[in-house]
Image (cartoon, rainbow, N blue to C red):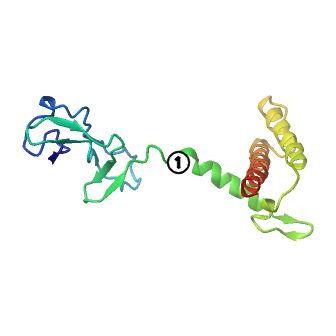
Amino acid sequence: MTRCSKQGTFDSERPLSQTNCGPMIATEMSPVERTPGELDLIENTVVEVTSSCTRDADGAGQQVNEASPVMRRFSGGATRDLDDDKLDFEGFFSPLVLQRYAEYMHKHRNTAAGRRDSDNWQAGMGLNVWIKSGWRHFFDWWSEHRGWGSREGIEEAICGLMFNAMGYLHELLKAQKAQRQC
């Protein structure tokens, strides 16, 4: 038995269209367009099905292993699985927002009692503390949106809301994890 190749033929050069192998996708991806001055280390990749079908001695295509791995092959020779089902942190977050949020968090580390550790908030506060503070920050954000101004401005209000939403979610997730461990 021989394996289908990424070029769309069997190793014996019989075209896929003349086989029963089912869909084979071999796609060359275009390079990402960059603006002048941006670092472009992204290479063209080839997506290939590495073991989607086999052929027996008489040449009939035969489906095997429906959960066949699909790989990316890079021009340098490296291979990686597809990242379609992986969390895309790079895409889900904005560097601009995270930078501003970190500035907000750093600014609020200093208190009358001294400087807090950056992860002090993870030590926990009650859900009522998080929700009440979150509402105040939401109200400031909403007031700014409506043109009425607020205590600290729209960016501070949004960062404060993000902080309280993360704190609340952190407490929920900690409690769920603790329950699963019981």
Residue extending farthest to the right is 112
Q: At 27% from the left edge and 45% from the top edge, which residue is drawn? A: 48
Instruction: Name the spot of residue 22 as percent of width and height, x first.
Output: 24, 32
Is 113 displayed left or right of 95 in the figure? right
Q: Nearer the viewer, residue 79 or 49?
A: 49
Instruction: Name the spot of residue 168 as percent of width and height, x first.
Output: 79, 48
* Snapshot quadrant of residue 77: bottom left
Q: Nearer the viewer, residue 51 or 137?
A: 51
* Snapshot quadrant of residue 117: bottom right
Is 110 displayed left or right of 91 in the figure? right
In the image, residue 126 above or below residue 65: below
Instruction: Name the spot of residue 89 as percent of width and height, x first.
Output: 54, 50
* Snapshot quadrant of residue 106: bottom right
Is 99 displayed left or right of 181 in the figure? left
Amino acid marked by disc 1: Leu
Instruction: Name the spot of residue 39 as percent of width and height, x first.
Output: 40, 56
Quadrant of the drawing holding the C terminus = bottom right
Mark 1 closeness class: few <14, some 14–19, many ≥20 residues within 10 Å? few
Q: Nearer the viewer, residue 118 or 147?
A: 118
The residue carrying mark 1 is: 87
Q: Nearer the viewer, residue 81 or 35?
A: 81
Residue extending farthest to the bottom is 114
Which secondary structure, mark 1? Answer: loop
Q: At 60% from the left edge and 49% from the top edge, which residue is drawn? A: 96
Is 161 displayed left or right of 28 in the figure? right
